[in-house]
């Protein structure tokens, strides 16, 4: 589990059990700081636009103008992302092929005991849908934070 990040990376989400589920890396601390500043400005602009639209919808002074300040556009982008999840274990059959084969290979090579193997596979079976949902939520949060949708 990721416990900390270098100064040129930011956490993009997490929870109490896994505090850093996804993160973005930048070429420098300065780029990271600039990205965070621009993202805050963009979010403030979005909030202002929503408030303005709501006020206009409910009756305002008639000013239709909207500000499209290019300085709030996020121009610095991360060069890499990491996710504290393993979507590579998933196939069209869920976890039944890739994950199970990986656990079995670990057992066969003596890296884990048969009991640990059995428990890991049972845990995957019982918690599969929750893990899948959490993984998707983390990826959506990253894409949303970056303005991809």
Image (cartoon, rainbow, N blue to C red):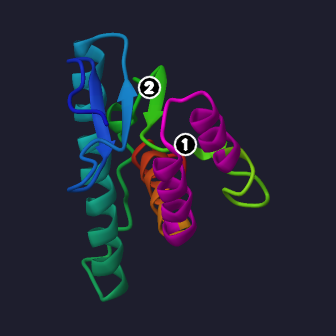
Residue 124 covered by magenta stretch: yes
Residue 81 % position (x, y): 46, 30
Looking at the rendered image, the disc whose residue lies closer to the viewer, 1 or 2, is 1
Residue 94 % position (x, y): 70, 60
Image point (56%, 57%), residue name: 121
Kindly give the residue lying farthest to the right in the view shown.
Answer: 92
Q: How would you rate the neighbour count of disc 2 (Cα within 10 Å): few for under 14, some for 14-19, many for 20 or more?
A: some
- Name the N-terminal-most of marks 1 and 2: 2
| Range drawn in magenta | 99-127
Spatial separation of the CA atoms under disc 1 and disc 2: 24 Å
Quarter of the image with the N terminus in it: top left
- The kind of secondary structure element at disc 1 is loop
Q: Which residue was labeled with disc 2?
A: 77
Kindly give the residue lying farthest to the bottom in the view shown.
Answer: 58
Image point (33%, 42%), residue name: 12
The majority secondary structure of the magenta stretch comes to helix
Q: Which mark is residue 86?
A: 1
- The kind of secondary structure element at disc 2 is loop
Q: How would you rate the neighbour count of disc 1 (Cα within 10 Å): few for under 14, some for 14-19, many for 20 or more?
A: few
Image point (26%, 61%), residue name: 48
Identify the image quadrant of residue 9.
top left
Residue 116 % position (x, y): 46, 49
Residue 134 % position (x, y): 45, 60
Q: Is residue 74 above or below residue 58?
A: above
Residue 26 vs residue 6: left or right? right
């Amino acid at each position: 589990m990721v416990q900390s990040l270098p100064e040129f990376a930011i956490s993009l989400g997490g929870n109490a059990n896994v505090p850093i589920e996804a993160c973005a890396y930048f070429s420098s601390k300065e780029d990271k700081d600039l990205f965070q500043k621009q993202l805050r400005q963009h979010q403030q602009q979005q909030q202002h636009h929503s408030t303005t639209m709501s006020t206009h919808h409910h009756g305002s002074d008639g000013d239709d103008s909207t500000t499209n300040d290019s300085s709030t556009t996020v121009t610095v982008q991360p060069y890499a992302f990491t996710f504290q999840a393993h979507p590579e274990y998933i196939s069209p059959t869920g976890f039944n092929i890739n994950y199970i084969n990986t656990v079995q290979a670990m057992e066969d090579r003596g890296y884990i005991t048969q009991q640990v193997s059995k428990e890991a596979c049972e845990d995957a079976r019982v918690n599969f849908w929750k893990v899948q949902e959490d993984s998707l939520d983390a990826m959506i949060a990253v894409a949303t934070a970056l303005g991809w949708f």
